[in-house]
Image (cartoon, grey):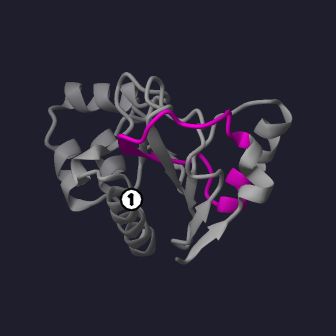
Amino acid sequence: PGVNDLTGKYGNLASGKRSSTQGVVLHRTESSSAASTLSGYDDRIKKGSHIGAQYLIDEKGGSNLVTPLDSMVSHSKGFSDSTVGVEVVGPAKKLDRTGAKAPLRDQISALDLSPKMEQRLLGYNDKKLNNVVKWNGDQIYEDISGAQKRSVWNLSNHLAKEYGLDMSSVSQHGADESGANNY
């Protein structure tokens, strides 16, 4: 309930059916709006690409089903055939590791991060912090909005019940998965 069905327009992003459902993978978009992300999906469909996700949580927290739920979409290297992909709108913030504009720690403190994430990042020594930012393509994702959190929570719980998953089956990008932004 409450999910906007966009499968009629974006269903061709799928490359077939998933073999099973063993988890949910949460992603972030590189765009700041659902409209921009969906425009990118249009371009991918025209090029024959199947990179995307089954769901898109927009900037206001709205839930959108992009491809049929049982479809396979390329969203997580090695796991796309057994997981549901959920993208949450919100681009990463580019950081300057050289410190030309501001020290890296000040740049991180100025971001809208969850307290736990900020504490984690600022808890690293300077070398490790610099490396974490480097490993993430010199960018870090800020926290998502309360409305987006509610939508992610509701959708994740619904999918967990639907497929008999526990919440430990929900993950985010890891170092061996697609994309540079593993945090």
- Point out the residue furthest to the bottom here: 2
Q: Nearer the viewer, residue 110 or 85?
A: 85
Quadrant containing the C terminus in the rendered view: top left
Establish if 5 lies above or below 135: below
State the SS at label 1.
Answer: helix
Where 90 sits versus 82, above or below?
below
Relative depth, front residue between 16 and 116: 16
Query: Does 164 sit above or below residue 57?
Result: above
Residue at x 24% of width, y 53% of height: 167
Res. 115 in view: yes
Q: Quadrant of residue 151?
A: bottom left
As drawn, is 124 to the left or to the right of 145? left
Q: Magenta span covers which residues?
A: 13-38
| Residue 95 in sight here | no
Q: Which of 27 and 84 is in front in this view?
A: 84
Q: Is residue 48 left or right of residue 146?
A: right
Is residue 171 highlighted in magenta? no
Is residue 31 inside the magenta stretch? Answer: yes
Q: Residue at x 38, y 69 (%)?
A: 154
Q: Residue at x 55, y 73 (%)?
A: 60
* Residue position for label 1: 162
Picture mark count: 1
Mark 1 Cα within 10 Å, few/some/many (few <14, many 20+)?
A: few
Q: Residue 126 in the image: x percent, y percent? A: 20, 31
Task: Write the residue at 42% across / 64% down.
Answer: 155
Describe residue 76's horizontal placement relative to residue 110 as left or right: right
Residue closer to the observer: 169 or 149: 169
- Measuring from the top left, give residue 91's x and y in whole percent: 54, 50
Which quadrant holds residue 160?
bottom left
Indicate the amino acid at tag 1: Glu
Question: Where does residue 129 sit, x and y in percent of width and height?
Answer: 25, 33
Q: Quadrant of residue 149?
A: bottom left
